[in-house]
Image (tube, rainbow, N blue to C red):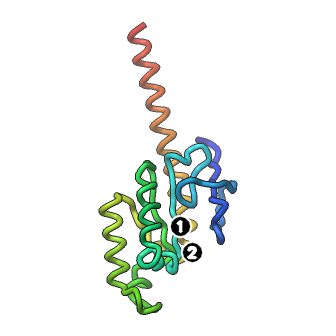
Amino acid sequence: MKDKPVIMIDQREKLPWKFDSPTESALLQTADYSIRGLEHRIAIERKSLDDLLGCVGRNRERFTRELERLQGIQCRCVVVESSLEDIRAGSWRPQITPAQTVGSIASWMAKFNVCFFLAGNRDLAARFAERFLVNAARTLASEYEAAVEFLEVAGGRDG
C-alpha cells in the first residue's frame, strides 16, 4: 500500500477531525470514520466527553445499538476526546458520576469487545484515529496479499 488510503468521514459529523491523509465525506452506515472500500471492515466511533456522558445517560440505548452494529466490523474502536483524568475529575452535571462513566466504559469494552481509546483531547484523538485507520488498512491489505499468495501457491500444486 504505497498511497495513503482515503479516510471516509460520515457526513453527519458536526465537527469532523482534520487529517493529513486524503478524506471524503459519505453517509456511513456504521460509525463516524472508516477507509474507502473498507467501510464494512474498519470503523471508528468518535465521542467528545459530552457525547460520552450522553451515552452513559439519556442516549444509552441508542449507543448500545451502535456498539451492536460495530460487532460486525473487524477493526473497530471508540475514540474519546478526553482523558481518564478528565472523567475522574467529574466536573460536569451531577446526574452522571465519574464511577458510572468509567463503569459503563468497562462494561461496554467487555460486552462488545471494543476498545475505548481515551485520547486526552481533540487533537490527539484525531492523530490517533488517523494512525488507527491507516494501520488497520495496511493490516487488512497484508492479510489479503498473504491470502492471494497462498492461493497462487496452492493452485500451482493442484495443476
Q: Residues within 10 Å of mark 2 (few under 14, many from 20)?
A: some
| Residue drawn at x 41%, y 57% as measured from the top left | 68
Residue wearing tag 2: 122
Q: Quadrant of residue 100?
A: bottom left
Image coords of residue 26 (percent x, y): 67, 54
In the rendered view, would you say 155 is above or below 114?
A: above
Q: Nearer the viewer, residue 56 or 32?
A: 56
Apparent side of residue 124 relative to residue 58 in the rendered image (left or right): right
Residue wearing tag 1: 46
Image coords of residue 3 (percent x, y): 64, 45
Image coords of residue 18 (percent x, y): 66, 66
- In the rendered image, the quadrant that contains the N terminus is top right
Q: What residue type is disc 1 on?
A: Arg
| Residue drawn at x 35%, y 77% as measured from the top left | 102
Find out whether the residues at labels 1 and 2 contact each other: C-beta distance under 8 Å.
Answer: no
Q: Residue furthest top?
A: 159
In the rendered view, would you say 115 is above or below 135?
A: below
| Residue drawn at x 51%, y 59% as measured from the top left | 44
